[in-house]
Image (cartoon, rainbow, N blue to C red):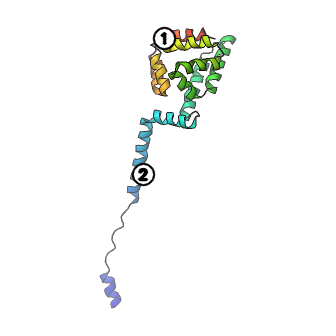
Amino acid sequence: MREARRRSQKKPRARRKRRWPRVIAILLGLIVVLGVLAVVFFTPLNNTYRNVTGNDTPADSAVKAQLVKQIEKRKTGDPTTDAVLDQAATTLDNTKMSTIVQAAGNQDKFSHLLQSTTGVPAAQANTAAAAVFSTSELTPLREAVAEGNYVKAYQEYQALSATAKAQASSLLSTYK
């Protein structure tokens, strides 16, 4: 009889709370928030990673790969022109993005980069650097590169007039 009483006196089990849906929702929310923050703060994070490691970031490598593709698209079939374009693509691929970013923000570093990558004399490199830094149409593009903001640099490049692109091209071609 005692057993019968115990059975009848047992309290009904409290229903177990399901915590996993809540935990999963919180984790997914955190992942989404972190993803949004990474997108919003991409440029500073990319620049910090580049400055800390001293190496190209994955974004730098992707940007350089796209630039090399664009350079190679301009091949004409003329061996002289194609050799210059190949050299430009190789030089771009072998130059660290941190060096390019620093050169875009400093005229002396830009001049030194021209000297070291193209072999032009110092006087010509200084003249070319002065021309690039004094051309007002190139300033927004140069500043975007100096900030490491590739999206803005691309937009500024697209916004350049055909005249500015032709000027830049002729300026650089005179210093081969």
Q: Position of residue 154 (x, y in %)?
A: 48, 23
Pick whichever, 7 or 24, lies toward us.
24
Amino acid type, mark 2 = Leu
Residue 164's disc is 1
Q: Nearer the viewer, mark 1 or mark 2?
A: 1
- Asked which secondary structure carries label 2, the reply is helix
> Where 130 falls versus 96 (above or below)?
above
Pick whichever, 24 or 91, lies toward us.
91
Amino acid type, mark 1 = Ala
The image quarter containing residue 87 is top right
Residue picked out by circle 2 = 27
Pick whichever, 4 or 133, lies toward us.
133
Q: CA distance from mark 1 to mark 2?
A: 50 Å
Which residue ends up furthest to the bottom in the rendered image?
1
- Split into 4 quadrants, where in the image is the N terminus? bottom left
Q: Position of residue 100 (x, y in %)?
A: 56, 24
Q: Position of residue 156 (x, y in %)?
A: 45, 20
Q: Position of residue 134 (x, y in %)?
A: 48, 12
Crowdedness of circle 2 by 10 Å Cα count: few (<14), some, many (20+)? few
> Where 77 falls versus 90 (above or below)?
above
Q: Please state the total of marks drawn on the protein image.
A: 2
- Asked which secondary structure carries label 1, the reply is helix
- Split into 4 quadrants, where in the image is the C terminus? top right
